[in-house]
Amino acid sequence: MVKKTKTNKISEKQIEVIDSLKKESKELNFQLGVLIRQKNKVDENIKKLEELIADYDQKEIDSLKALQEELGDGHLDLKTYIFTKAE
């Protein structure tokens, strides 16, 4: 035996509420997608900058080591660029 189900059409007000919720959900998901893409770009830029900083740090170490090997131990005044050899 097939059971019949009773169907009712919902009211226009109820349809408006559902349509409003669907629209809001779609907009929120769109905004989330935009933010995720922006975050991924920021993360990518941070990674590139961290690599540049690491390269700079190594360059600084190598340069200072070469300067020390050339001049010996001492003090370099970074305002006047005068090197005073340690005694």
Image (cartoon, rainbow, N blue to C red):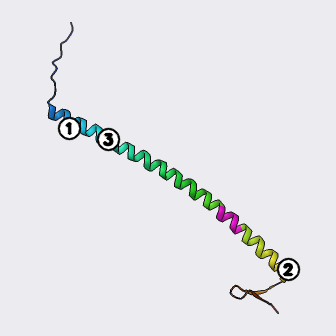
Along the horizontal axis of the image, is 79 left or right of 33?
A: right
User: What span is in magenta?
Assistant: 52-57
Question: How many angstroms separate mark 1 from mark 2 (CA)?
Answer: 78 Å
Q: Is residue 55 magenta?
A: yes
- Residue at 68 percent of width and 87 percent of height: 79
Helix, strand, or loop for circle 3? helix
Numbered badge on residue 32: none
Determine contact: label 1, label 2, CB under 8 Å: no
User: Label 2 crowding class (10 Å Cα cut-off): few <14, some 14-19, many 20+?
Assistant: few
Q: Which residue is mark 2?
A: 70
Name the amino acid type tagged 2: Glu
Main secondary-structure element of the magenta-colored stretch: helix
- Residue at 57 percent of width and 58 percent of height: 46
Name the amino acid type tagged 3: Ser
Q: Which residue is mark 3?
A: 25
| Front-lying residue, 76 or 4 | 76
Helix, strand, or loop for circle 2? helix
Numbered badge on residue 17: 1
Helix, strand, or loop for circle 1? helix
